[in-house]
Image: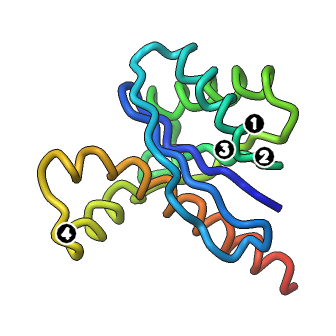
Amino acid sequence: MKIMAVDFGDARTGLAVCDRTEFLASPVGVIHEKEFYQTVNKVAAAVKEYDVKEVVVGYPKNMNGTVGDRAKKCETFVEMLQQIVDVPVKLWDERSTTVSAHEILNETNTRGKKRKAVVDAVAATIILENYLDYRRSQNAK
């Protein structure tokens, strides 16, 4: 099943999609949008464009597991998106994914404007890879 991961942000929202076998997660782009409802609509359009059957949205809990303002905004994003797409939309713990994305970009020596342009898509890819790993571990039980 094709699954999309979303790394929601106030100005940039990263997207990643896996193949139908759920083996390979790939970044598919970044939505540059500051208006909340426009971002929701653009992600909904991407859901249709990529013909995904499930969406996971990064849930940036605090390191101690509490829910802050950013996580609450993601909850609202999920609620709004769920109203306009016909596939399940769920939150997925994304603690440390942006840090991991920056580490990957350091390893590939991606700097400056190019780094800023791709870090959100890389973070979405990490969210999706973590979710796919979880699904595989659940299926193995």
Secondary-structure class at tag 2 = loop
Residue type, label 1: Lys
What's the CA distance linking mark 4 and mark 2?
Answer: 32 Å
Counting from the top left corner in percent of width and height, residue 101 is at 34, 61
| Circle 4/circle 1 CB separation < 8 Å | no
Mark closest to the chain's N terminus, 3 or 1 = 1
Distance from disc 3 to disc 2, alpha carbons, whole Å, reads 19 Å
Of 132 and 44, the residue lying toward us: 44
Q: Which mark is residue 51?
A: 2
Residue designated by label 3: 91
Q: Residues within 10 Å of mark 1 (few under 14, many from 20)?
A: some
For marks 1 and 2, give the CA distance.
Answer: 5 Å
Which dot marks residue 106?
Answer: 4
Report the residue that reaches farthest toward the left. 112
Query: Do the residues bearing badges 1 and 2 touch, measured as CB atoms within 8 Å?
Result: yes
Q: Is residue 10 left or right of residue 53?
A: left
Do residues under tags 4 and 2 come within 8 Å of each other at their CB atoms?
Answer: no
Residue 120 picture location, percent across and down? 39, 47
Query: Which callout, 3 or 1, points to the residue nearer the camera?
Result: 1
- Quadrant of residue 30 in the image? top left
Amino acid type at circle 3 is Leu
- The part of the image, by quadrant, that contains residue 69 is top left
107 left or right of 86 in image: left
Foreground mark, 3 or 2, reads 2
Label 2 crowding class (10 Å Cα cut-off): few <14, some 14-19, many 20+? some
Mark nearer the N terminus (4 vs 3)? 3
Residue located at (42% from left, 33% from top): 9
The amino acid on which the numbered mark 4 sits, given as a three-letter code, is Asn
**Which amino acid type is marked by label 2?**
Asp
Label 4 or label 1, whichever lies nearer to me, is 1
Q: Is residue 30 above or below residue 40?
A: below
